[in-house]
Amino acid sequence: MSDIPRPRPGILEIAPYVGGQSKLAGHGEVLKLSSNENPLGPGPASLAALRALVSGNEGLALHRYPDSGHGRLRAAIAGAHELDAERVICGVGSDEIITLLCQAYAGPGDEVLYSAHGFLMYRISALAAGATPVAVPERERCADVDALLAAAGERTKLVFLANPNNPTGAMVAQEDVRRLAEGLPPTALLVLDGAYAEYVEGFDGGAALVEARQDVVMTRTFSKIYGLGGLRVGWGYGPAHVIEVLNRIRPPFNLSDLQQEIAIAALGDAAHVQRSRLENAQARDWLTQALRDLGLAVDDSAGNFVLARFASAEAAVAADAVARGEGIILRRVEGYGFPEGLRITVGTMGDCRRVVAALRRAVEQGA
Ligand SMILES: Cc1ncc(COP(=O)(O)O)c(C=O)c1O
């Protein structure tokens, strides 16, 4: 086995990302609450755009390459969020923007920082780029700005911070995010991951900080509140010098016209976003309280999911098994440093009731 082709150092340290499961043996229909998807699905405007595109009325030409500059989509994003379209970059989910940032800014000998319970893609993308991932301890399951600042040094090239964070649902206050941006070494880029930003009423995801500085980037997605996880469209917003760098390595035809057009339609559907935000908040508050009433530890979440912590890893495994037995898929989060936890996507109120009923049975059985 010594003379076979080998990948670069770091690649074999990557544990392959395992997406939320969507099937259970023995269950025709499952309740999937493992990937933080919008239970309402896409809004009517996105579906209408899809139908029009597929029916051929909208001039979708599959033999033509798509718009590699994403001009109409960038303009629509900029219009909806009051941003500069020239400094928007679109990708195959925000995952691709995260990957491009690591590829462009971090390599062997460089460090990529993130908070200990941060999104798994930060570590994966850092290792894939040959850089060293550094998980910085949190305080009470929330990113600790002082610890991040203390860990940052001249080797630090990127610092990732998700607000709200997955899987904890925690938010770092804007003044602390600003303090982090101001205190990092001048050669480090701060990446504010706003995958769940729309769930927080009035939150700009960090856009104002991007506008104010030359070393802050924001990533966003259509996968969560827009209900389009399967479409694979995300975007980034940053200073011109960063966007220009990322565009040099972005695969030119990364998004099809179909993806771009449906995302544009979604941006015009403010009512769907508003409805999704309101229904999520109501169901999340109910779910949080109901889980606490079962004796589980649950922090307040700002996202469309909650993290329920059991007395032990064994109890979480047992509760997960009970839920599966009832056709409900939750997310084990040992990879995020919570072997005792289950992350539960906030579904409809009916979904939440089913989860609580299943977990009540699990607790009664000793989980
Ligand atoms: C914090 C965070 N960032 C980014 C993403 C990536 O999402 P996507 O690639 O679908 O935009 C996710 C997905 O779960 C996430 O939880």
Image (spheres, rainbow, N blue to C red):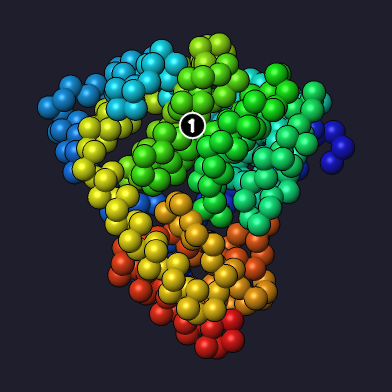
The answer to whether residue 14 is left or right of residue 266 is: right
Which quadrant, please, contains the C terminus?
bottom right
**Foreground: 13 or 286?**
286
Residue located at (39% from left, 52% from top): 37
Q: Could you tell me if residue 359 is visible in this image?
A: no
Which residue sits at x=30%, y=70%? 350
Depth check, front residue: 272 or 30: 272
Residue 352 visible in the snapshot:
yes
Q: Residue furthest front?
A: 175
- Pick out the residue farthest to the right: 2
Q: Nearer the viewer, residue 327 or 89?
A: 89
Q: Quadrant of residue 340?
A: bottom right
- Which residue occupies the extreme bottom position in the image? 365
Q: Name the residue under label 1.
A: 206
Q: How crowded is the residue under tag 1: few (<14 C-alpha within 10 Å), some, or many (20+)?
A: many
User: Residue 254: x percent and y percent?
Assistant: 44, 24
**Residue at image x 24%, y 21%?**
61
Circle 1 sits in a helix, a strand or a loop, which is it? Answer: loop
Q: Position of residue 318 (x, y in %)?
A: 59, 78
In this rendering, the answer to whether 252 lies above or below 10 is: above
353 in relation to 224, above or below: below
> Residue 40, percent across and down?
28, 54
Q: Where does the N terminus fall, quadrant-wise?
A: top right
Residue 96, compared with residue 213, is above or below; it is: below
User: Which residue lies at the image location 46% right of the left edge and 52% below the top edge?
Assistant: 302
Residue 312 position in % (x across, y down): 67, 74
Residue nearer the viewer, 354 or 103: 354
Is 336 situated left or right of 21 in this image? right
Q: Is mark 1 within 8 Å of ligand 1?
A: no
| Kind of residue sitting beneath label 1 | Gly
- Quick check: 268 left or right of 256? left
